[in-house]
Amino acid sequence: MAKPNYSFEKRQREIAKKKKQDEKQAKKQAAKDVANPPAPTKDDSHG
């Protein structure tokens, strides 16, 4: 019987955790962007 590869399992858990964190951060950023749309800068409005 093969022995369990704990290093692989740990790495997979870490990857899943990071992915979940990134998704949460992206969702948070999207909500922030919707609430506060970026205003045009004064430098660009000079004509």
Image: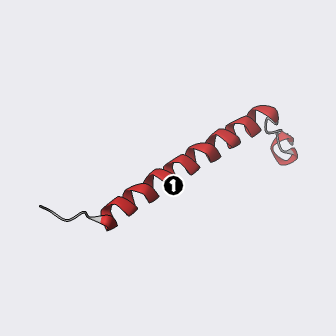
Residue 23: x %, y % from top left: 56, 43
Residue placed most toward the observer, 25 or 45: 25
In the image, taking residue 33 as reference, residue 19 lies left or right, namely left
47 horizontally vs 4: left or right: right
Figure quadrant of residue 4: bottom left
Residue highlighted by disc 1: 18
Q: Label 1: few (<14), some or many (≥20) within 10 Å?
A: few
When asked about the image quadrant of residue 2, the answer is bottom left
Q: Quadrant of the C terminus?
A: top right
Going by the numbered disc 1, the residue's amino acid type is: Lys
Residue reaching furthest top? Answer: 34
Q: How many marks?
A: 1
Q: Quadrant of the N terminus?
A: bottom left
Q: Residue at x 79, y 39 (%)?
A: 38
Tell me the residue at 64%/39% (across/down). Answer: 27
Q: Is residue 35 above or below residue 2?
A: above
Q: Does residue 22 appear left or right of residue 28 in this picture?
A: left
Depth check: 7 or 39 in front? Answer: 7
In percent of width and height, residue 42 lies at 88, 45
Question: Residue at (83%, 44%) from the top-left corner?
Answer: 41
Is 29 placed left or right of 39 in the picture? left
| Picture colour scheme | secondary structure
Secondary structure under tag 1 reads: helix
Q: Nearer the viewer, residue 34 or 19?
A: 19
> Which residue is located at x 84 percent, y 48 percent?
43
